């Protein structure tokens, strides 16, 4: 089945941006999404381009769409129907950005090929293709232009890796029509996107948009389907960070994993950091036994093709 494709993009959330079209509840649209650099990064680039990217054009989103009859207090449901592979993507470490920005101060850039099943991250590292859009949101009630980078209660750059094909995202409406936009597609990403990027890629995404009148919610929520790649479980390598500050614990857990990958797998620290960002899973394991909390960082063993790497 062929659906109307949305091509036009914008670079901020602003409830004064004129909608591209008005759609009805239940309509389906295909979105022609650029990568997070807006197409500025090509396979010919070196890492230094990351220091020259203009921030005001990053994370472009397709839209906005006006949903007929949507009003504040309603909910917009977004069901993800399909993601079409773009073939290649990039992962970067940007100076002054990412969970461990104080540790990684130089730009670093890596390109990965992928197909409809796998992302070929490195010689012995193959990650399941698990596409999703990182930025999905409605316009905020507050007037003016709002940066796309931080997420808000009406959605935005949430980078939730579980919003895959078959997932349903629910967003609270703050302005008439909702003004829906989507962008920032990834071929795969870890929970936390710790280095600040995933496998960033251009991709076409198809979604059905529905209106739920009066079903008020305070923030986004979502329904996650069973994902075939999740069944490829060979266990995990897990590091922890323990202390009274969750952010510090998250940093400690990721640093621990980078150190482990570096020492036991002879992996370059920047590559290890990027791998954590595209394939790891940052979790809170304990938050009740005060004064210390436990943050854990998981790397799935299944991504390693070498037996020695699975034993680190």
Image (cartoon, helix red, strand yellow):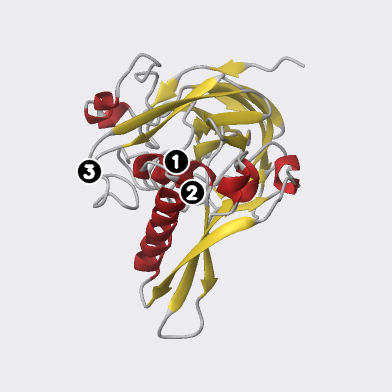
Residue sitting at 29 percent across and 44 percent down? 97
- Which label number is shown at residue 105? 3
Across and down, in percent, residue 203 comes to 55, 23
Figure check: 181 above or below 49: below
Which image quarter: residue 35? top left
- Which label number is shown at residue 57? none
Could one spot residue 74 in this view of the protein? no
Figure check: 205 above or below 194: above
Residue sitting at 42 percent across and 26 percent down? 18
The residue pinned by badge 2 equals: 154
The residue pinned by badge 1 equals: 139
Contact between marks 2 and 1 (CB within 8 A): the answer is yes
Q: Secondary structure at mark 1?
A: loop
Across and down, in percent, residue 256 comes to 41, 60
Residue sitting at 38 percent across and 22 percent down? 38
Which image quarter: residue 16? top left
Q: CA distance from mark 2 to mark 1?
A: 7 Å
Q: Secondary structure at mark 3?
A: loop
């Amino acid at each position: 089945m062929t659906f109307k494709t949305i091509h036009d993009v914008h670079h901020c959330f602003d409830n004064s941006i004129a909608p591209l079209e008005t759609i009805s509840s239940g309509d389906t649209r295909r979105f022609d999404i650029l990568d997070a650099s807006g197409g500025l990064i090509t396979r010919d680039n070196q890492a230094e381009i990351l220091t020259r990217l203009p921030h005001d054009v990053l994370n472009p989103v397709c839209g906005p769409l006006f949903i007929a009859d949507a009003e504040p207090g309603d909910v917009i449901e977004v069901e993800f129907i399909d993601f079409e592979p773009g073939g290649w993507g990039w992962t970067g470490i940007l100076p002054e950005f990412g969970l461990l920005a104080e540790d990684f101060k130089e730009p670093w850039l890596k390109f990965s090929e992928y197909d409809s099943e796998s992302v070929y991250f490195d010689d012995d590292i193959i990650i399941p293709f698990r596409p999703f859009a990182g930025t999905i949101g409605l316009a905020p009630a507050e007037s003016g232009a709002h940066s796309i980078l931080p997420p808000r209660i009406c959605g935005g750059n949430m980078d939730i890796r579980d919003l895959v094909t078959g997932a349903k995202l629910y967003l609270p409406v703050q302005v008439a029509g909702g003004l829906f936009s989507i962008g920032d597609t990834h071929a795969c990403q870890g929970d936390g996107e710790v280095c600040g990027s995933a496998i960033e890629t251009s991709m076409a995404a198809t979604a059905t948009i529905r209106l739920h009148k009066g079903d008020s919610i305070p923030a986004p929520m979502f329904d996650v389907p069973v994902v075939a790649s999740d069944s490829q479980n060979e266990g995990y390598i897990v590091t922890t960070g323990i202390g009274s500050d969750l952010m510090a614990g998250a940093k400690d857990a990721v640093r621990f994993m980078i150190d482990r990958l570096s020492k036991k797998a002879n992996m370059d620290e920047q590559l290890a950091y990027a791998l954590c960002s595209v394939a790891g899973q940052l979790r809170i394991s304990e938050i009740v036994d005060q004064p210390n909390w436990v943050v854990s960082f998981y790397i799935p063993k299944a991504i390693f093709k070498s037996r020695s790497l699975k034993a680190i």
